Image (cartoon, grey):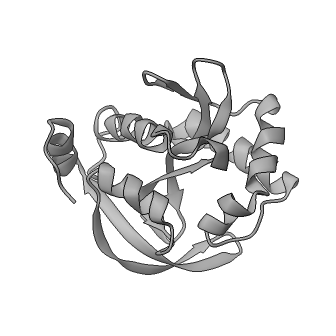
Amino acid sequence: MLRTERLVVRRWRLDDLDAWEAFNADPLVYGALGGAPLPRDACDAMAAWHNDLHAHEGIGLLALERTADGAFLGMCGLHHQETFPDDVEIAWRLASEHWGHGYATEAATSWLDHAFGPLALDRVLSLTDRDNARSLAVMRRLGMSHVGDAVVRDGDEVFDALVHEVTAASWRVVRQGGRRG
């Protein structure tokens, strides 16, 4: 579990799944991802998969909760993206009513501290659709650099993505108040 000033990143619970399914059916959310809504069985399977990944590897796309009121906001975390199986990707997905409050950047910052601290990773990737301006803005705030384009497979979905990265060295610069990216 990771904590920030306003957030807790934690394992998925059964009481998260109705909200998770609802916002994955929100056209603003799945439209920004370039895909289709996730059905309930896929939401449930994804939560279980990432809880297991976290238990075994210390990574996973985990539930994001606001500490002030316990509200479920979405998910954020590290995982293996099938297009780049030797790398770790950081990803986030928030309910549209929680966009614009800095939650994605705050949660991702905590995960990157974990990635380059206890996990001792050399680099972390992030992938997004070229039209996803909100995720691109988060990547810029995290000091990530565009390193290429890729055709990405995510389950049955295939889309063109922009590939960004942050290295351990560049993350240290970002955390010391410098800018990169």
| Image quarter of residue 156 | bottom right
168 sits left or right of 57 in the view: left
24 sits left or right of 79 in the view: right
* Residue 134 x %, y %: 47, 58
Residue 108 in view here:
yes
* Residue 101 x %, y %: 49, 39
23 sits left or right of 57 in the view: right
The residue under the point 58% across, 79% down is 159
The residue under the point 78% across, 60% down is 38
Position of residue 150 relative to residue 75, above or below, is: below
| Image quarter of residue 84 | bottom left
Residue in front for this viewpoint, 84 or 70: 70
| Image quarter of residue 31 | bottom right
Position of residue 15 relative to residue 116, above or below, is: above
Residue in front for this viewpoint, 64 or 141: 141
The residue under the point 58% across, 17% down is 68
The residue under the point 31% across, 50% down is 141
Position of residue 178 relative to residue 154, above or below, is: above
* Residue 52 x %, y %: 65, 39
How many marks do you count on the picture?
0
Residue 95 in view here:
no
* Residue 107 x %, y %: 46, 37
The C terminus, quarter of image = bottom left
